[in-house]
Image: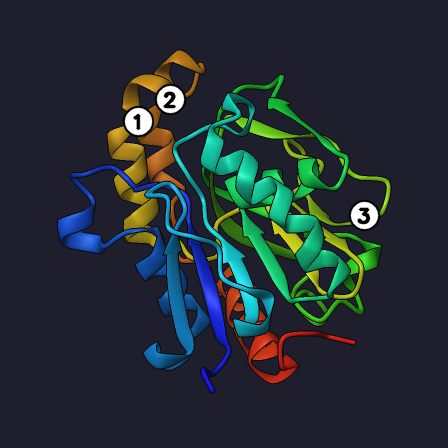
Amino acid sequence: MKSRKIVIIKTGETFPSIIPRLGDFEDWIARGLNLPPQDIQVVDVEAQQPLPPLDRIKGVVIAGSHAMVTQDLDWSLELEAWIPQLIRKKVPLLGICYGHQLIARAMGGIVDYHPGGLEIGTTDIDCVFQGEEDPLFGGLAQRFKAHVVHSQTVIRLPESSVVIAKNGFEPHHAFRIGPCAWGVQFHPEYDAAIETAYIGNMTQAIEASGQDPSQVLDQVVETPVAAMVLTRFGILASVSGGSCF
């Protein structure tokens, strides 16, 4: 019998200049999960790899992407249609950035461009009341640093969700649906080197948004508390057996 895996859903690639030195989205997520390689499976949905059956899954992480949810790409619509099945079966699920937005829309939320434009750099994230007893956020600092880079956002959350974290720019930096499905707009898988590389690749977009790339760069620091969210998810999914009843 095949063992269950924690599945990383790859939804695109990072900038080509970053990959040789720092790796790609799935590498960063696998590192953050802090699990043996044999416990992890990467499924590249952009490359038309099929989604795995639920009885082969311990948990799912939907990665970030340079695509936009509102493009309604075929692979993204197929993935979006799969998400409610995971939530109904209480499969541990974590969406990061693009994945966060896709989970929200799959469950009835609205995604569009953020009216404030681009959020990029290392920023403060505030846990709100619902996060105090949360399996991923409970016991973390009420305010912590996290890496961000996004232009789209969850404009309206699904009715079934609760807000876990926010900041002054982004009111929906983390939410939960049911006992074990989360979306995080920030990037727990990024470290300072990755965020720095993103800033370097996006100077024109940063300037176009009215920000100074050098000031954004100066604020980049490591984000160990944000990273714990991904590590905690790895632990939860590993012991879940594929469902957190």
User: Residue 17's x, y, as percent?
Assistant: 16, 39
Residue type at mark 1 is Met
- Within 10 Å of disc 2 (Cα), the crowding (few <14, some 14-19, many 20+) is many
Residue type at mark 3 is Ser
Q: Which image quarter holds the C terminus?
A: bottom right
Distance, label 1 to label 3, CA atoms, is 32 Å
Q: Are marks 2 and 1 in contact (CB under 8 Å)?
A: yes
Q: Secondary structure at mark 2?
A: helix
Q: Secondary structure at mark 1?
A: loop
Question: In the displayed structure, does residue 197 sit left or right of residue 73?
Answer: left
| Residue 97 visible | no
Q: Which residue is mark 1?
A: 202
Distance, label 3 to label 2, CA atoms, is 31 Å
Relative to 216, is 235 above or below?
A: below
Q: Secondary structure at mark 3?
A: strand
First in sequence: mark 1 vs mark 3 = 3
Q: Which residue is mark 2?
A: 206
Question: In the displayed structure, does residue 196 sit left or right of residue 209?
Answer: left
Task: Tell which of 77 and 71 is nearer to you.
Answer: 77
User: Residue 240's x, y, as percent?
Assistant: 65, 80
Residue 161: assigned label: 3
Q: Which colour assignment does the render follow?
A: rainbow
Quarter of the image where one finds residue 70:
top right
Relative to 147, is 132 above or below?
A: below
Nearer to us of marks 3 and 2 is 3
Task: Tell which of 111 and 117 is nearer to you.
Answer: 111
- Within 10 Å of disc 3 (Cα), the crowding (few <14, some 14-19, many 20+) is some
The residue drawn where x is 51% and y is 71% is 231
Question: In the displayed structure, does residue 46 sit left or right of residue 63?
Answer: left
| Residue 198 visible | yes
Quarter of the image where one finds residue 67:
top left
